[in-house]
Amino acid sequence: MFSKILIANRGEIACRVIRTARRMGIKTVAVFSDADAQSMHVAEADEAVHIGASPVGESYLRGDRIIKAALSTGAEAIHPGYGFLSENPDFVDQVMAAGLTFIGPSADSIRAMGLKDAAKRLMEKAGVPVVPGWHGDGQALVLLAGKAREIGYPVLIKARAGGGGRGMRRVDDPDGFADALAGAKREAKAAFGDDAVLIEKYVEKPRHIEVQVFGDNHGNAVHLFERDCSAQRRHQKVIEEAPAPGITPEMRAAITDAAVKAALAIGYSGAGTIEFIVDASEGLRPDRFWFMEMNTRLQVEHPVTEMVTGVDLVEWQLRVAAGEPLPLAQDQIRLDGHAFEARIYAEDAAKGFLPATGTLHHLRFPSHAPRGAEMRVETGVRQGDAISPFYDPMIAKLVVKASGRATALSALVEALGETEIAGTIANVPFLVALASDDDFASGDVDTGLIGRKQEELTRIAPPSPHVDALAALAASGAKPRISAQDPWDALSGYAHFHPVRRRVDLRSGPDEVSFSVTARRDGRYEIAGADSSMLMAADDQAADARTARWPGHVTVFEGAVGHSFAIPDPFEAAEEAGAGGDALRAPMPGLVKIARVAVGDSVSKGHALLVLEAMKMEHTISAPHDGKVEEIAAEGAQVSEGTVLVRFAEG
Ligand code: ADP
């Protein structure tokens, strides 16, 4: 076994690999970019090496620097995690040429599965069912249009080099074919530098079912059952589960058998996933699934398989890479219970799942598993860490397992409801809505489910007057009572030099609400708004809602929904004025794309001052009133949230 490995990745997957390595007595080396210098994976590894600037092209995709880091620290092998360099055969060749071990399949296996058309031809030869269609070399419009007609509409045009759903077009009738083909080719050329396509029958009511396979260097290959990943938004998975709901023993035997055949056909070594598309229009049938593609790495959703098999897949990866045979034979691998994984992202579900950034000022996961369930939280961030614009905005994966599907699903809903995230927008309410959806709960899933119900699944009710009042109480600085003290003590923050009545202004989106919070002699507070008034004890809040204070804000958690309110702070404004004029601060971490003005310029209200790029989107910062520019951030500067972008004096 290795004594030291390097992990060429970041975030939760780097932390995940470190955990198993540590248990096995293997030392770990992390690599990190500028943005990740203080990150969790760096803190958890035994050693860490800086490999470059924050953009992935200058750090996590720099195979040369990663190999150099492994050699200089004495690591014997490199674990690629997922994404980044994990499916890059040239990187595998370079790792081997440097005398290191790649913890994953051979470069040849990755190449064999790299292009969708070649992979389908290979699978056909191995006797694995592939989606009916055309995956030959010819690319002329007349040929492809003829093939589409033969296959029968609707069809799907796919880029052979495709990934992430790019270069993919559904076509419903012959009239739309030429345009769709041109569009798919244009997109494929731009994304992959290769515009060759294949044509597939469009599968109706499609389910995405994949099989976890494992091979070793001694000619063995096994499967570890299936996962269902049909809950997708924008062709990306959100909640995965194992086993697949409604699968019959015949269907399981057929699909896992096909997957093992596929792995054996390419002499596969290590962890891999065979993805199938399944026509579920008449339930799951053994003659209605087809090979789509193989992922030659560990998947994001691998924990659900670990939960139901009891196998540590990272341990198997390390053992196989070190030359050991597979730890278990096929008949020793058992399936027990049902597991779900929910991917918690920083994103605005209601705005089309728009990725978000921000500092995780408040981050709390359930302290224990729901009753009757097991739970794992896979994360690479801690409270206070930032979700930066440079990387995938995943915050955590919440994984639960129980004896049956219904129990596991209610455990998932319960655990999500106890998750608290403030400082960025998270998709937790959407995940709860999806997990609580009738069709999802009954196992009637297909890849179009989220798209059809998007509006209803992403809708969030505005905060109730009760939530507003709780926010006002928390914002007023009221502290939970330690004992039956007099309220002057509870209000110690300001009680000595202010009356016990305090005005609180809160902003929630475009709405402003004002309250007056009054401490009463009986230890309770009276919270009076424009048209209602409530009595609460500061420590009563725990009963049905939880609150979190963070700089300039308060968040009230009601179940899975976090309602955030901004608290305009008069002291902060005064400080800014004293420091010389108005300061416009970065609302999120980003890159200063364009500085439109210079120090000394006089600008009028509304004038565009600077363009900040964050999460691949541009935000224009404009002057709130007339003034003279005293300070401006440099073009090309990477700024963190709260950094002063422009400071200018009135007049
Ligand atoms: P990519 O590599 O770009 O992610 P895939 O081939 O993996 O593309 O397909 C992505 C998703 O598109 C699948 O999970 C499925 O939801 C849908 N899809 C793919 N092929 C078909 C098909 N033939 N019919 C219907 N839907 C399909």
Image (cartoon, grey):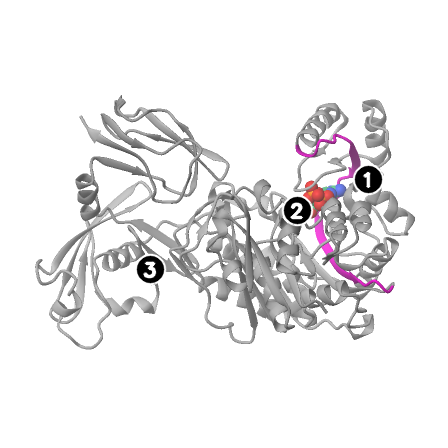
Q: Determine if the magenta segment contains residue 334.
A: no
Query: Residue 471, percent across and down?
Result: 28, 56
Near mark 1 (Cα within 10 A), the count class, few <14, some 14-19 or many ≥20, is: many
Q: Which residue is mark 1?
A: 117
Instruction: Please tell me whether residue 33 is drawn above or below residue 175 in the rendered image.
Output: below
Viewer-proximal residue among 192 and 187: 192
Residue range in magenta is 191-218
Please identify the quadrant where the C terminus is shown: top left
Disc 1 element: helix
The amino acid type, in three-letter code, at marker 3 is: Ala
Q: Residue at x 21, y 63 (%)?
A: 478
Q: Which residue is mark 3?
A: 548
Q: Quadrant of residue 452?
A: top right
Sequence-first disc among 3 and 2: 2
**Residue 356 visible here:** yes
Q: Is residue 421 left or right of residue 78?
A: left
Q: Which residue is mark 2?
A: 63
Q: Determine if the magenta segment contains residue 209.
A: yes
Proximity of marks 1 and 2: CB atoms separated by less than 8 Å: no
Separation (CA) of disc 3 from disc 1: 52 Å
Proximity of marks 3 and 2: CB atoms separated by less than 8 Å: no
Sequence-first disc among 3 and 1: 1
Query: Residue 300, percent across and down?
Result: 63, 56
Please identify the quadrant where the N terminus is shown: bottom right
Near mark 3 (Cα within 10 A), the count class, few <14, some 14-19 or many ≥20, is: many
Q: Is residue 208 left or right of residue 553?
A: right
